[in-house]
Every structure is written in C-alpha cells, then in structure tokens.
Image: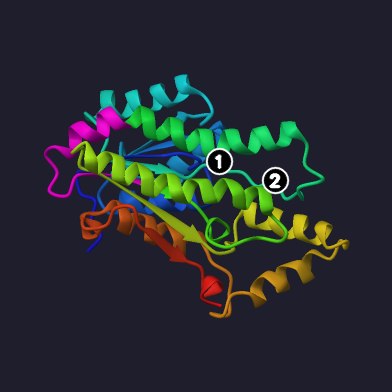
C-alpha cells in the first residue's frame, strides 16, 4: 500500500521537519526525491541521514524564485527523466496580529506561503503533465495547507489567510487541470499543531500574543485543543502526504486531507 516505486518527487522546504520526514518515507516507498530548501547544510545532512545511494539529492530552492524552481525541476528531469510528484511544503509562520504586522512582513509571508505554491505548481506542470500521460492514475501535487486554512484563528489571522488561499487554490488547480485533461491530481493536507521547529515558534508567538512569556502554558493550551490527547509529529503528516502522492489516492483530486487530532471536529 502507498507504494511510490519508480516515481520521482520534488519536495520544497524538505531540509527538516515535515518535509524531511516526507522525503525519508518516500524513499522508503520506492521513490527518488529532490530535497529542495534554502538551508543548504541542513538539506545535505538530511540526504546523508536518508542514506540510500542516489535515491535522494539536495537542490537549493528558494520558493520565491522562478530561477530556483526551474533549476530544481530541471534537476529531476536531467537526473531521473521527469517529475511525478510535487510537494509544496515550504512555508513560514509570522505569529503577529493584524495591527502588529508590517507590510514588509505580510509581503514576505505571502511570498513564501502563496507565491511559492503558485510558482512551484506553474513551473512543474509541463513535467508533471508529461509523466501523467503514462501513469495509471496520473501525476500529483500535494499542497501543505493547515487547519488554519479551514477555520479561523484568533492568534494567527495572517497565517490563516495565506493557508486559506492554499486550500482554495488546491481545489481550483485540480479543476483547471482536469478540464484541460492534464491527468494531474491536486490535493491538500491540513495538519493540526505539529512538533517541529515551526510548531515551537507558534508556542512562543502565542504566549507573546496572550501577554505572557509562559511558553509551556501556550503549549498546553495548544494540546488541549486536540481531542486525541497529543500534538502531531512530522511522521503523522508525512504518512498522509505519501498516501496522497501514491496511486492509492488515484480517485482523489481537489480534496483536503485533515490530519489534526480532532481539532476541527469541535
């Protein structure tokens, strides 16, 4: 189940956290993976940790740069002959309220969380379309959204705004590609609070926004919103991404897979 034998994937923001774990699981499932990130040393270390010869390579990728995207996609095509899966994983969290955020901070948030997804999708389409012609269930794009892209966030409204954009872009891209007969499935995944470097940043920001420096209390507050009784791990999300990328999800497009420990069920 969820096998990716022979598939070629490009994952943005894959040097650490959810992206790195996704790369590891994809290689285990039989894929070859381009690990894209701006963190060059960390990305190369992730390749070494995966430890499967020639199955994973690092490529510098600033998702706000057309040139970087073209180079990363070109690396997949040159090295392995194409691209079957794009995972738009790179993202950033601002953690400031509407009144506190500057225009420069907002523009940076949009550049990574929205422009990055647009550029990756736009520039990967020719390669994904070509490989999709001969794949039983076509090729696939998985976009990292968030529960903050499904419900409102009283502490992270600007992040929520960008992830809401990713959610609807996913559905619209799926419909456009289906209309054009491209055989490119597009789905999103919506994590709850995950124990990553970004997750830790959210606890600090939430404590500050609540007028306290008590990060542990902010963490416990986040935990209390997850009925399952724990926060998520990178592996929880990576497993969902691998499923959406695999042929097991061959009848899914324009869908959002919620992996949130019950947060949005309330």
Between 25 and 251, the residue placed more toward the observer is 251
Q: Nearer the viewer, residue 71 or 111?
A: 111
The C terminus lies in which quarter of the figure?
A: bottom right
Q: Are marks 1 and 2 in contact (CB under 8 Å)?
A: no
Q: Is residue 64 above or below residue 97?
A: above
Is residue 223 rendered magenta in the image?
Answer: no
Residue drawn 66% across and 60% down? 153
Q: Quadrant of residue 155?
A: bottom right
Vertical side of 21 occupied by 76: above or below: above
Residue situated in front as seen by the camera: 152 or 131: 152
The earlier-in-sequence mark between 1 and 2 is 2
Camera sees residue 212: yes
Left or right: residue 261 compared with residue 142: right
| Residue range corresponding to the magenta coloring | 125-141
Residue, disc 1: 113
Estimate the x, y position of residue 4 in percent, counting from the top left: 24, 51
The crowd level at tag 2 (other Cα within 10 Å; few <14, some 14-19, many 20+) is some
Left or right of 238? Residue 158 is right
Which residue is rendered at x = 39% and y = 22% of the image? 70
Q: Residues within 10 Å of mark 1 (few under 14, many from 20)?
A: many
> Which residue is depicted at the point 26% across and 30% down?
127
Residue 138 lies within the magenta run? yes
Percent x, y of residue 197: 63, 52
**Disc 2: which residue:** 94
Q: Quadrant of residue 3?
A: bottom left
């Amino acid at each position: 189940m969820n096998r990716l034998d022979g598939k070629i994937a490009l994952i943005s923001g894959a040097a650490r956290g959810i992206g790195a774990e996704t790369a590891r699981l994809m290689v285990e499932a039989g894929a070859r993976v381009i690990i894209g990130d701006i963190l060059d040393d960390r990305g190369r270390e992730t390749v070494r940790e995966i430890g499967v010869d020639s199955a994973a390579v690092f490529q510098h990728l600033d998702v706000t740069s057309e040139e970087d995207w073209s180079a990363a996609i070109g690396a997949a095509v040159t090295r392995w002959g194409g691209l079957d899966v794009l995972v738009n994983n790179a993202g950033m969290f601002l953690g400031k309220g509407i009144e506190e955020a500057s225009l420069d901070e907002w523009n940076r948030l949009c550049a990574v969380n929205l422009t990055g997804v647009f550029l990756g999708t736009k520039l990967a389409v020719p390669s994904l379309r070509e490989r999709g012609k001969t794949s039983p269930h076509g090729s696939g794009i998985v976009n990292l959204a968030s529960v903050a892209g499904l419900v409102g966030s009283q502490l992270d409204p600007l992040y929520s705004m960008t992830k809401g954009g990713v959610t609807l872009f996913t559905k619209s891209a799926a419909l456009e590609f289906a209309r054009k007969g491209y055989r490119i499935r597009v789905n999103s995944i919506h994590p709850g609070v995950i124990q990553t470097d970004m997750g830790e940043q959210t606890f600090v920001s939430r404590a500050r926004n609540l007028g306290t420096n008590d990060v542990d209390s902010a963490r416990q507050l986040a935990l209390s919103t997850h009925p399952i009784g724990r926060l998520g791990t990178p592996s929880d999300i990576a497993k969902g991404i691998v499923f959406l990328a695999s042929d097991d999800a061959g009848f899914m497009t324009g869908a959002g897979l919620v992996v949130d420990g019950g947060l949005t069920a309330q």
